[in-house]
Amino acid sequence: MHANIRGFMLDTPNNEITKRQGMLLLIVTVGGHALKHAFNAAFAVMLPSIKSDLILNNTQIGILSTFRGIAGGIANIPAGIIGDRFIKRRAEILGGSIMLVSVFAFTLGVSTNFWMAVLAASLFSIAITFWHPAAISSLSKEFSSRRGFAIALHGTGGSIGETIGPILAGSLMSVVSWRIVFQGSIVPGLLFGIIIWSLLRTIPASQPSASITGYVKSVLRILRNTKLLLVLIFAGGFVGGQTTVLTFLPIYLSEEMDANTATIGIYLALAQVGGIASQPIMGFASDKFGRKFILTPSLCLLGLCFIGISIVPSGFPLGLVVLLMGAFLFPLMAILLAAALDLVGGETQAATVSLVFGSATIVSSFTPTVAGKIADYYTNTQPAFLLAAGLILSTALLAGLTNWQSKSHES
């Protein structure tokens, strides 16, 4: 049975979810994703202050980012299993994820040395990781006929959070310290986590039909899918470039452009504004014309933007490049996720989401450390952006030359 939700199809097998419940699921997951990314983006704005307060160098900042990446990547394994096998508990999973993010943000706010900050930031990343598999797999199942568009709308929520987070954090830090911002975030985090839980618990979710043995066989089967493996490689290259830029852009703005925290927040917000509009458009276009049609040229443009950051002057030119970069910086992950989910069955949706995020994060987690070493060697952060650009452009070339789409999206 199909119900139309404002222009795209809601798939409701066995009448388990109504039109109203589908709309509520979409709104809550998009809104929760915005909140999650507001926390994540605030972390980036505070990096220069964390670096200064704890007396860290660029290599240590890169190591901090690497540990966050490894922790989040490894956490994707249990997150995917839980998202598939305990989908009936998605209210607890998603609400709990937001609450734990705020708890570990508080812990980061009371950190007094480098390794304590690394531990808190890693736990922060693990809590964030548990959002994606349960949320995205739910949308993928309920909106399978418009998967790219639904996942892109979820991503738009993330872009909104990444836009609001830097401005809010930058503004607060002009009044109070980064520690107070992190410590105070526990209140809204716990409150919104409870709200998300209370709303989602009213929406039914189907019980997994496969046994544990059948589920394991399904996961092993998707690992032999060569097209999926290519998508995972693309995700690794994309996230490697993305993470490097997000790690060192605030450092670059603070140390080489002499920007204050409010200005850094504005620049980082600009990096997301374009994605708010472009993400649903790109998702819709990928449903209609194919994932490859969107992914390959978008990666090329993103790589050029990374080069532009390292060479254009501050002010309007840099703001324009950052704005253009934002049209692709987060939206492309939605395309990669949709491409991966096109290739797998319904029983392993959350596991596939975890594979995309996990493999991408683990493969790319060492890139910020390498970039930090290069930045320390040259005593500036501009080479880090060139490294990120090289990763992205290499990924674009591979995506353009290989066959990796599902048959339904091949042109």
Image: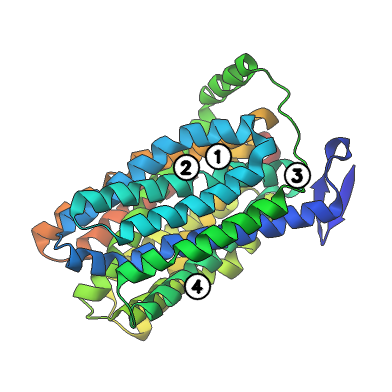
Is 325 displayed left or right of 225 in the figure?
left
In x, y percent, where is residue 324? 46, 71
Q: Nearer the viewer, mark 1 or mark 4?
A: 4
Q: Secondary structure at mark 4?
A: helix
Residue located at (65% from left, 51% from top): 197
- Which of the marked residues, 4 or 3, is nearer the chain's N terminus? 3
Amino acid at the residue labelled 2: Phe
Comparing 275 with 399, the one in front is: 275
Residue named by callout 3 = 142
Q: For residue 115, say whether it is visible.
A: yes
- Which of the marked residues, 1 or 4, is nearer the chain's N terminus? 4
In x, y percent, where is residue 332? 52, 54
Amino acid at the residue labelled 3: Glu
Residue named by callout 1 = 353
The span from disc 4 to disc 3 (Cα, nearest Å) is 28 Å
The span from disc 2 to disc 4 (Cα, nearest Å) is 23 Å
Residue located at (51% from left, 53% from top): 99
Residue named by callout 4 = 164
Amino acid at the residue labelled 1: Val
In x, y percent, where is residue 384? 24, 59
